[in-house]
Image: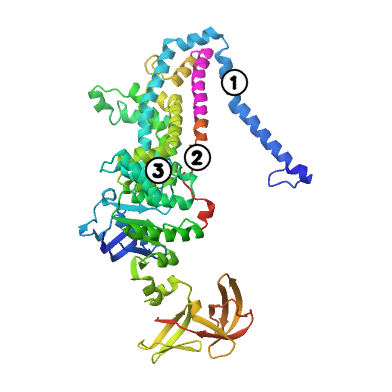
Amino acid sequence: MKIRLENVVKTFETFRAVRDVSLTIESGELVALLGPSGSGKTTILRMVAGLEYADGGHIYFGDQDATDIPVRDRGVGFVFQHYALFPHMTVAENIAFGMKVSKVKREKAAIEARVVELLRLVRLEGLGDRFPAQISGGQRQRVALARALSVDPKVLLLDEPFGALDANVRHDLRRWLREIHRELGITTIFVTHDQEEALDLADRVVILKDGHIIQQGTAEEVCRNPQSAFVMKFLGDANVLAAEVRDGKAYASGAAIDVSGMADGKAELYARPADLDWSAQGPGIPASITRVLDRPDGRRVLATTETGDQLEFDVEPERPVKAGEGGFVTLRRAKVFAL
Amino acid sequence: MGATRTGRKPPRVGDQPLFRRMLIGIVLVIVALLIVAPLVVIGVEAFSKGWVVYRDTIIHPDTLHAIGLTVFAAIVAVPVNTAFGVAAAWSITKFDFWGRRFLLVVIEIPFSVSPIVAGVAYLFVYGLQGVFGPMLDEYGIKILFAIPGIILASMFVTAPFVARELIPLMQAQGRDLEEAATSLGASGWRTFFSVTLPNVKWALLYGVVLCNARVMGEFGAVSVVSGNIRGQTNTLPLHIELLYHDYQAAGAFAAASILALIAVFTIIAKVALERQGAGRVRRPALVTSPAEKAQ
């Protein structure tokens, strides 16, 4: 089901949570709403679900205006951050709940068969008689997903689905959700504040800030081509240097980078830790190493430039670097944004 | 425990033996004087003139009528206040509306107001000189110095019990479960009976038990509005006072022993319910483990 938001607005008392958001989600697409807390991402999701009503604008499900359809009749599957499993019902009863209360009457046997099928889909065969308190967090989240899918929703909505889980479980569930999505082909929107999760999982990432869409695109588009300093900073670690643009070149702490087409003036230069390198001889930005952090996949070096800027960059694990060493930071690539 | 291992352990804060013994001693003495002694006296005095007097007091028509009236007041007031408490807790915790916090405060007022104030207030609202009194009198409806007044006064005093037990619990549980049920297609009623109620049932029962105990024991408000007509508008607590003023100490204590018995059953029910997790603010039954929370 294609979902279309048109100039959607939502205000809580005086706080404008969502300001004029328009967004189209194609049928079968897996979209991430990514943003810091307070960016309006959860509010947008809840408006699509019908758990909140939009103050202005329209939400279309296919060609149907769903803006004022109550959540009960909207036909969405919603997965809550803290699972919201019914604690007094078994796993099987939780999954069957939607089918039991549905206006569409189902045979008892049909419901049971569907529960078994869903338990198999979420790989929880044999746990149907357990209560939610007796299974792990990752398993609960999978039950929540099975329950949401039980009513054959037109769209699947997940609110920070892995937010309450530990890192390993989160990693597994992410892959698994991707598989389920491929298997079922259901239009899916999920909310997250974790960039890695959004980039790994989604066909398209929608980045929000202060109730606006700042940028959207595939993981490749937003990573390689951030349109603003905010997106650059939000998507990952970034070094910032004050820069000055003159005649199509940006100059920062002794380094220069080509920025043809940019107007002259003050700017900021952003570089990822992997975009910088270290060498004993110039040319480059003169700096001295303050700390070396060893990590499983390499070494992170913290350095201070002569002008007092802090820089972080990665080197190969074999590289002999020590705190106190002097040398030069070189720029492989960088993004420059006008101030 | 630790003392055998290290021989002597430095006392923790407030853990000096002298201080500990003194504090515990003082508390025990106060409990004995203030709570245990009077209860023992009830039992002793009730039977001081022998079993026959005790039995005669209990089966005296006035006493039986007082018991009947007390039970009747409870039968009406408790269900009404339970329904009110559930409705109030539901609206306060599941909806946002203007004046929500104010309502929360208003519901608690009967706890902080002396019951006698409530009684007098009812007098001014429903009495013949009161606001609605003359109008009600015209239609021949008698509220004060009659059973409706007793029930109304009891209800005023016990209005907060159920709501007060439910509100913190339902607040802690949040709206997720109801939202989940609704998004799965459940109607409001279905959501309430299948999802909300099962998760608050122990707290609800706990509130009902406390509410019942208070209705049956209420004296102050009821004494103002009932008129103390023996065999007509006398509840059990009022009857006890009446017997006492008639210099029938043994009779008063015999009647009091019934209330004491109700109290004992209330305490048993209360403890049993607390074992089920009612009566304290519980986190939602489904909490994530600390490891998951840390993420």
Magenta residues, start to end:
B246-269
Few, some or many residues within 10 Å of mark 1 (<14, 14–19, 20+): few
Residue drawn at x 26%, y 62% is: A4
Q: Which chain carries label 3?
A: A
Amino acid type of disc 3? Ala
- Asked if labels 2 and 3 share a chain, the reply is no
Circle 2 SS class? loop
- Cα distance in 3D space between marks 2 and 3: 30 Å
* Chain letter for mark 1: B
Which mark, by number, is residue B280? 2
Q: Can residue A263 be seen in this view?
A: yes
Q: Tell me what residue is drawn at x 59 percent, y 87 percent.
A: A280
Q: Decide if residue A77 is on the left or right side of residue A266.
A: left
Residue A13 visible to an observer of this rendering: no
Residue topped by disc 3: A92
Is residue B254 magenta-colored?
Answer: yes
Locate residue A67, reporting x and y percent: 24, 56
